[in-house]
Image (cartoon, rainbow, N blue to C red):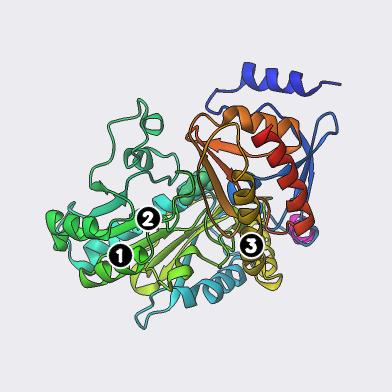
Amino acid sequence: MPNSNDYIKMDHEYGAHNYHPIPVVISKAKGVWVWDAEGKKYLDCLSAYSSQNTGHLHPEILEAMKEQMYKVTLTSRAFHNDMMGPFLKQVCEVVGPHLTLNGSKTMVLPMNTGAEAVETGMKVARAWGYIKKGIPKDKAHIITCADNFHGRTITICGISTDPVTRHKFGPFTPGFSIIPYGDADALEAEIQKIGTENVAAFMLEPIQGEAGVKIPPKGYLKKAREICTKHNVLMLVDEIQTGLCRTGKLFAVDHEDVKPDMFFLGKALGGGVYPVSAVVTREEVIGPDVIPPGTHGSTFGGNPLAAAVGMKSLEILIRDKLAEKSEEMGAYFVDGLKAISEHKTRLQVKDIRGKGLLIAIEFEGNARPLVEELMVNGILAKDTHETTIRFAPPLVITKEEIDWALEIIQKVFTE
Ligand code: PLP
């Protein structure tokens, strides 16, 4: 029987080294817990980057998946299937009230991964710009934010400010600019600079997850919304990580009662078992006059298995009030971390921040050794940008489990 070291060696020998995982090999999971190849148990405080909001192996999601698996799994969009429609209807009912609809109705374009949803949304925004806003040919412009993370395609890497993400991947797609995050005046100025008539969209994360849980100043989202409306610029929000209850609301934009023109959803929409993503917007933006047949597609997007999983995941997130749970447990977790930071810690704590169960603790120095010690002590978390550790457990975590985690975190941080 191979052991954890053998599996790590295999990854290293046969796989591209495009990740630097912490040295743990997970072979089993349930709820908030995972087990390594030797049977040691850990609390999952990453949740596959917020994909496991409903907890690992949710029995109802597995059941819905299993039932669908023995009926039909993939047809391609060359044919209709009897699961996609009900799934899209449910997404419209859930997401529609959070969108700016302007008298139009909600419509969905289903994809698979997060990056695909982002790419799709940017294509839709450009097409809307030409067809509805009247932007001259090849002039459509999209404004993005510094320190963003939207995925890994070439276009998305081209709008990243992280040199490691950009690496040696240029030349990049034209038609984008990058402004400071959290600065509404910079958005107004950039639109003026590019020319209102050419700006199709402003794209942002309402909280920047990968940047280390960066929360913009209060009022920023509202101001950005107003500026977008004033200039007839679409507000595209990437809620792939922050959406679906992670931050204590269904969507992070709900914290400011802001209604964007388009949502990108992914990760938790797939219930932690299957990649499911979606672009959700209004008909005026994505209707057949903007995206007619043949202009976009995906072999797997909207497949019946994905639809079954997506429907059950959405149902559970809402039925089990996971947003409220996230808000309550997140506040409890943050209070615990703040109490720990009042002790003398091994690395000085610079900041503790969070919304719901999307929490970060930032240190004055490299946090990777702390992450590895947390692992040895039974907690799986991941450093981001070296100095920050994110705690984002499944939203089904209990107070008792957080108490257990805080005891270990205190030991590791102060020892
Ligand atoms: N957008 C955001 C905000 C993300 O956090 C991520 C992944 O971490 C993505 C997009 C990309 O998603 P995927 O890895 O499924 O392509």
Measure how far apart labels 1 and 2 are at the Cα level: 10 Å
Quarter holding the N terminus is top right
Quarter holding the C terminus is top right
339 relative to 123 in the view: left or right: right
x and y percentages locating residue 161 in the rendered image: 33, 38
118 relative to 266 in the view: left or right: left
Measure how far apart labels 3 and 1 are at the Cα level: 26 Å
Q: Secondary structure at mark 1?
A: helix
Of residues 209 and 298, the one nearer the viewer is 209
> Which amino acid, by three-letter code, is at mark 2?
Leu
**Nearer the viewer's eye, disc 3 or disc 2?**
3
x and y percentages locating residue 36 in the rendered image: 79, 33
> Which amino acid, by three-letter code, is at mark 1?
Ala
- What's the mark number on residue 204? 2
Picture residue at 23% right of the left edge, 69% below the top: 232
Measure how far apart labels 3 and 2 are at the Cα level: 22 Å
Q: Is residue 248 above or below residue 273?
A: below
Picture residue at 79% right of the left edge, 55% below the top: 400
SS majority, magenta: helix
> Which amino acid, by three-letter code, is at mark 3?
Ser
The quarter of the displayed image where residue 137 is located: bottom left
Q: Is residue 95 above or below residue 304?
A: below
Q: Which residue is mark 1?
A: 224
- What's the mark number on residue 326? 3
Q: Verify whether residue 64 appears in magenta.
A: yes
x and y percentages locating residue 362 in the rendered image: 51, 41
Write down the region rendered in magenta: 61-69
